[in-house]
């Protein structure tokens, strides 16, 4: 089989690899049918990652099940499934607590698309081994488009987690979104669907702002501190200065969720945060726990994640097209 391999800044190529094989009766082999780059993949392609190439890339896809071990009960060959970005067993104490990104049955940070906790391959590959099929794979609900939901492995379900629980606890809250890619746009869509009274989207890209307005958000190119303006802030830029501005805009006891990958250090206005009683969470997402709820919202018709898909591109064009600067391209295969 082939796996798309990141080899240098703005450069990826197909490399041959052995076909993955089932190694235990709880495993599955899947073939991605709609895969898309995560926002962090854009940083990696731009040369801002912290892992030296080469390595197999990709950790967001909807796939078709090709083969299952004898003990797999939740999916069957032919099923369309969401493949979570992190590898997790589903049975350890942390997984049972919903902390699937911190599974103790696999090496720390085991994931697709980066060889951090072992080499699990990437989801821009012709075939992928899923070691804990029953725990990891989530069937795609009937009627949902794999192209629209290619990001359910990470960014779409992450966006749900960034705001949905907070809006349930604070109905009608005002939401600030400081972003540069798909996560922030998904947050705008979800926030409006779940009853936010006001959404402000901050992004220098005019096309992104136009999409945010289609989701009912007000938009601006840059952010000036608006003290006590917003109940919930979401930062998805990976820039500490933008995170600092976001927390300055919170109401007393406001909540800030940082989904940016902060590869570079910086300073936060800690005294301001202390005086205002800010809650700040900076975290990778335990995505497997949130995928079912995020898919249910997508199936409800209240949201339109397909609007964020900027391009639909043939699988064979991955090496040439992935390094190009697109908001959210989805690469599709019709042969599986």
Image: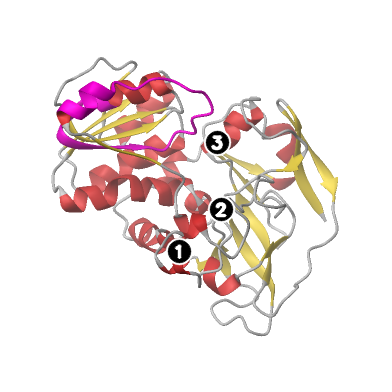
SS of the residue at dot 1? helix
Q: Callout 2: few (<14), some (14-19), or many (20+) C-alpha neighbours within 10 Å?
A: many
Q: Where residue 266 appears, x then y in whole percent?
A: 43, 20
Q: Residue 157's spot in the image, x, y percent?
A: 42, 52
Q: What is the crowding at mark 1: few (fewer than 14 residues within 10 Å), some, or many (at least 20)?
A: some
Give the distance between the C-alpha atoms of the residues marked 1 and 2, in whole angstroms: 17 Å
For residue 24, side relative to residue 181 (left or right): right
Q: Is residue 75 above or below residue 80?
A: below
The numbered disc on residue 4 is none
Quarter of the image for the C terminus: give it: bottom right
Q: Position of 21 compared to 228: left or right?
A: right
Q: Is residue 125 left or right of 264 when viewed as pictured?
A: right
**In the image, which residues are magenta?**
247-275
Residue 139 among those drawn in magenta: no
Residue 262 placed where, x, y %? 49, 30
The first of marks 1 and 3 along the sequence is 3
Horizontally, residue 174 falls left or right of residue 99, namely left
Where the N terminus falls, by quadrant?
A: bottom right
What distance separates the C-alpha of mark 1 from that of mark 3?
25 Å
What residue sits 37% from the left and 60% below the top?
A: 299
User: Comparing marks 1 and 3, which lies closer to the viewer?
Assistant: 1
Please give the count of numbered marks on the rendered protein.
3
Residues at circles 1 and 2 in contact by the CB criterion of under 8 Å = no
Q: Which mark is residue 94?
A: 1
Secondary structure at numbered mark 3: helix
User: Is 251 a magenta residue?
Assistant: yes
The image quarter containing residue 226 is: top left
- Residue 40, disc: 3
Q: Earlier in the sequence, mark 1 or mark 2?
A: 2
The residue pinned by badge 2 equals: 85
Using the image as rendered, state which of residue 187 and residue 304 is in the foreground: 187
């Amino acid at each position: 089989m082939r796996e798309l391999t990141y080899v240098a800044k703005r450069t990826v190529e197909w490399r041959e690899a052995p076909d993955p094989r089932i190694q235990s009766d709880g495993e599955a082999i899947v073939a991605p049918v709609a895969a898309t780059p995560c926002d962090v993949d854009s940083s990696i392609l731009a040369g801002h990652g912290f892992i030296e190439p080469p390595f197999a890339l990709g950790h967001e896809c909807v796939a078709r099940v090709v083969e299952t071990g004898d003990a797999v009960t939740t999916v069957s060959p032919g099923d369309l499934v969401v493949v979570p970005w992190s590898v997790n067993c589903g049975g350890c104490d942390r997984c049972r607590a919903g902390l699937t990104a911190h599974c103790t049955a696999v090496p720390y940070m085991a994931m697709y698309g980066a060889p951090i906790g072992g080499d699990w391959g990437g989801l821009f590959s012709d075939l992928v081994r899923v070691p804990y099929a029953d725990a990891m794979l989530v069937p795609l609900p009937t009627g949902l488009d794999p192209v629209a939901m290619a990001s359910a492995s990470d960014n779409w379900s992450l966006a749900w987690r960034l705001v949905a629980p907070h809006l349930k606890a604070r109905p009608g809250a005002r939401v600030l979104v400081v972003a540069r890619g798909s996560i922030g746009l998904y947050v705008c869509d979800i926030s409006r669907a779940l009853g936010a009274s006001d959404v402000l989207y901050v992004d220098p890209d005019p096309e992104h702002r136009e999409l945010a307005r289609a989701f009912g958000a007000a938009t601006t190119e840059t952010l000036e501190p608006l003290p006590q303006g917003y109940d919930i802030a979401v930062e998805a830029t990976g820039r500490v200065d933008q995170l600092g501005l976001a927390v300055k805009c919170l109401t007393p006891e406001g909540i800030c969720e940082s989904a940016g990958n902060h590869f570079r250090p910086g300073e936060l206005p800690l005294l301001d945060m202390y005086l205002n009683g800010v809650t700040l969470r900076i975290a990778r997402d335990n995505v497997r726990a949130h995928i079912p709820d995020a898919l249910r919202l997508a199936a409800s018709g209240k949201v339109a994640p397909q609007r964020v898909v900027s391009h639909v591109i043939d699988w064979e064009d991955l090496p040439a097209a992935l390094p190009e600067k697109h908001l959210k391209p989805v690469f599709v295969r019709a042969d599986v």
